[in-house]
Image (tube, helix red, strand yellow):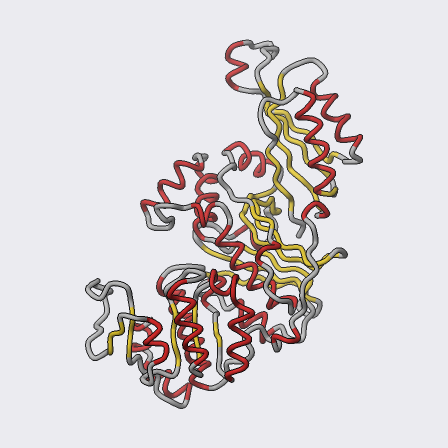
Amino acid sequence: MLRILRRQENALAARCGRAIRVTAVSARDRTRDRGVDLAGLTWFDDPVALAKSSEIDCLVELVGGSDGPAKAAVEAALASGKSVVTANKALLAHHGVALATLAEEKGVALAFEASSAGGIPVVKTLREALSGNNVTRLYGILNGTCNYILSRMEMEGLTFEACLADAQRLGYAEADPTFDVEGYDTAHKLAILTSLAFGTKIDAEAIHVEGISSIAPLDLKMADELGYRIKLLGVAERTKTGIEQRVHPTMVPKSSAIAQVMGVTNAVTIDADAVREITLVGPGAGGDPTASAVVADIADVARGTAGLPFGLPVARLETPTRAPMQRHEGGYYVRLAVLDHPGAAAAIATRMAQADISLESIVQRRSESAAARDPSGRSGAPVPVVLITYATSESAIRAALEKVSADGHIAEPPQVIRIERE
């Protein structure tokens, strides 16, 4: 961020009508080499003291975390009548409404473009560019680590564990990757975007969250054969039963724009009445993309154009009605390790029919290990069977699979991946 501000100093002054100057800084380790010259800047060991300092009129918070120093510093800055620019998705997901209320009371800005998709200007798009639209659905690839892992698994046939190790080696994944690969990072970002899209209060606790650690190379291979790719998506949709928020691995048609997004790149697709569908694609993480978004917010603050944090006064944000995940409706990919016993396949089909689940296709993959032992195929070893359903409910698919498991025809828990329509 500091490098961009210095490099673009004259251009920013011309665009904003005033100079933007960094005057003070605070961090945990004063001695760490950050690759930029901090000479001439006032150093604060306490970020709250920096937030209250008369030397600044805008605090940029890049500490991270939903509580602790980040929350204390942001609250102190807003309470002192200073604007805040932050990239802290966890802070906003948990305290965004309260912080926005404080910003409104003090008449200052709370800007957070960098919090949800790095360098992609999705916050401004939802809050400003699409203000004349009624958004019906928003979904996206919001975590580059997961997209990188799934892309490598698909293209090279590697396991999740192998791709995760490579992502860690390249710096795309943390030493403890749980927050990324189990979907929590995506959930925090989705909570913010849902509020902007639907004019509702942030409701992070309502998000159904699943990660990608259970995805096997066979799932990606089958998806490819069936005309899909698997992506970890964050999805927010207005349904008949309320606002549905979910994060999970998803089958997306190869023909869709979001299916083309590979590697660490992020993408967000927005369905709205006037524009119908738009997809924003770009770098979702990393120093420069994040800094680009942060500087854009700083420029808005300098110009005095930073508007209401969530596009509406907090008092007008609706309390969302939660759509239970059990009422989700859509197509499903189900992979079963079926024991090679007479009548097993027929029993599974019967259970599906009893739950009023229609099957679009059934694909059986003979186990290579079983074939090696018994060319006749009657070894009793599990055989991968993939079912593709027509639209059904989450409750129906779960009830049917619970009975399939109880019948004793499968050797391991079913793999269930939802299919997202175009």
Observer-nearest residue: 45 or 123? 45
- What residue is shown at x 44% (from left), y 34% (from top)? 159
- What residue is shown at x 45% (from left), y 63% (from top)? 118
User: x and y percent of residue 209 in the render?
Assistant: 56, 48
Q: Quadrant of residue 227?
A: top right
User: x and y percent of residue 207 in the render?
Assistant: 60, 53
* Quadrant that contains the N terminus: bottom left
- What residue is shown at x 67% (from left), y 40% (from top)? 332
Q: Is residue 355 above or below residue 240?
A: above
Looking at the image, residue 358 sits to the left or right of residue 59; the answer is: right
Q: Is residue 203 above or below residue 59?
A: above
User: x and y percent of residue 222 in the render?
Assistant: 58, 34
Looking at the image, residue 245 sits to the left or right of residue 91; the answer is: right
Q: Quadrant of residue 134?
A: bottom right
Observer-nearest residue: 151 or 109? 109
User: x and y percent of residue 94 in the render?
Assistant: 52, 62
